[in-house]
Amino acid sequence: MEAQTFTARVATPTTRLVGAMALVSMAWVVIGGLFVTPRDVDQGDAVRIMYVHVPTAWVAYLAFIVTAVASACWLLSRKHSMGFDRVAGASAEVGVVFMAMTLLSGSLWGRITWGSYWAWDPRLTTTAFLLVTYIGYLAVRGLGGSLEQRARRSAVIALLAVLEIPLVHFSVLMWRSLHQKASVLSGDGDIKMDGSMLTTLLVGVIGFTLTFTWLVLHRQRVLAMQDAMQMTQLDAALRERANESENKSVIESSRLK
Amino acid sequence: MDLTPRTSEVNAPLAPRKRNTKWGYVALLVVIVLAGGTIVTKFLTSAIDYYCNVDEIGSRVGCEPGRRIRVQGTVEKGSLKSVNNSTNFVMIFNKKTIQVVYEGDPGGIFQECIPVVAQGRLVGEVFEATRIEVKHSNAYVADNADRLKKAEAQVCSPQAG
């Protein structure tokens, strides 16, 4: 019964539509990635990891940019709407999950292709650092204090942390890296990828982006409920404390009499 | 209003739990800062440029012979040999070559005509590698029998990598 009420509160026609579109595109990626697209001439079947690795990396970047934009909106808006803060927090949480998936899938691909799970090269190291930074951001959000204190300190960190993204993305161009350069956004307009591989990859990017959108919409609503619950508990505690204080004053004044 | 801290367990049910949660997050932050420091240290130790090219050995700062370095080049066609669990091959880049010896099987998709990064030390004229990683390009080409035969017939480019 409680679960039904919960679903009714966080789901809307829009989120259901986004969820349905995410499911369809993810089904396409699974079928296309596993059964339709060809093996790579060098990597063999390991190329199929790319259909998860690249979209999750893209979504993680997107998530952290959304966190920064929402944080800036909170800092700059006159009303300091907590909605911005909750979107920032929800997006960072989802981004951390996707970034971890990027590292995990990349590590598996590296073992098959490079011959090792990990190398301390510029792309891998900066990506790991980005993940650690955003885990730190989430830890700061949980430090306690008022909702406004949480929003202010996490907004400042989010605006600083987002500066790492260009460093991660361009690390393969700035330094010599074991990680390959971009295939699609290479800058020279030459996409070095088989047609069906590229189609599946692009559908994967759309599918993972829709999944991210769906998750953030739901998560920020759950966070709104948590904040409301925290405020209710605070109000109750204050009322209880006020009653205690009043009772104490009555007892003390009756003693004095 | 009396705002002095509560001392009774009955009157203060929420306070201890809140404090524990806060210290948990502080501990997590300390762990994260340590993890971040470790990552940066490891990165700087490994140097920002992950490797030297074969033609840079002895001519570029940080690529001096005798010191432990990473070298990038392409496995020259026809040079790959396995002798007594040892992998021997010639690595080429910008028409400069180097003989590489590695104990064991490099793993991954290691093969002739593929760019690799070998980590080790130059001893005399031979590079004794302790680790070999395959450096895959950003090109994704569909596996095709005809294309494979054609590719096998070609000599790999010494400029690759």
Image: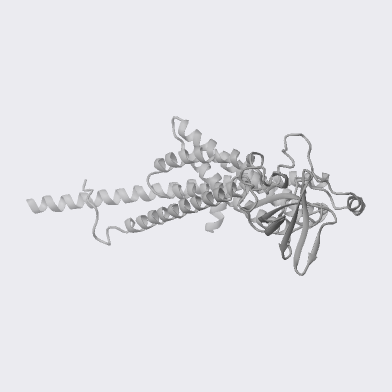
Could you tell whether A90 is left or right of B20 in the image? right
Could you tell whether A232 is left or right of A118 in the image? left
Could you tell whether A127 is left or right of A143 in the image? right
Relative height, residue B9 to residue B63 (above, below): below
Please name the residue shown 79% across and 65% down the image: B82
Outermost residue toward the left in this view: A257
Could you tell whether B2 is left or right of B20 in the image? left
Q: Position of residue A249 (x, y in %)?
A: 16, 49
Q: Quadrant of residue A35?
A: bottom right
Q: Position of residue A159 (x, y in %)?
A: 50, 37
Q: Position of residue B44 (x, y in %)?
A: 55, 48
Q: Quadrant of residue B109?
A: bottom right
Q: Is residue A10 visible?
A: no
Please name the residue shown 34% across and 50% down the image: A236
Q: Nearer the viewer, residue A45 or B1?
A: A45
Q: Nearer the viewer, residue B24 or A16?
A: B24
Relative height, residue A222 to residue B89 (above, below): above
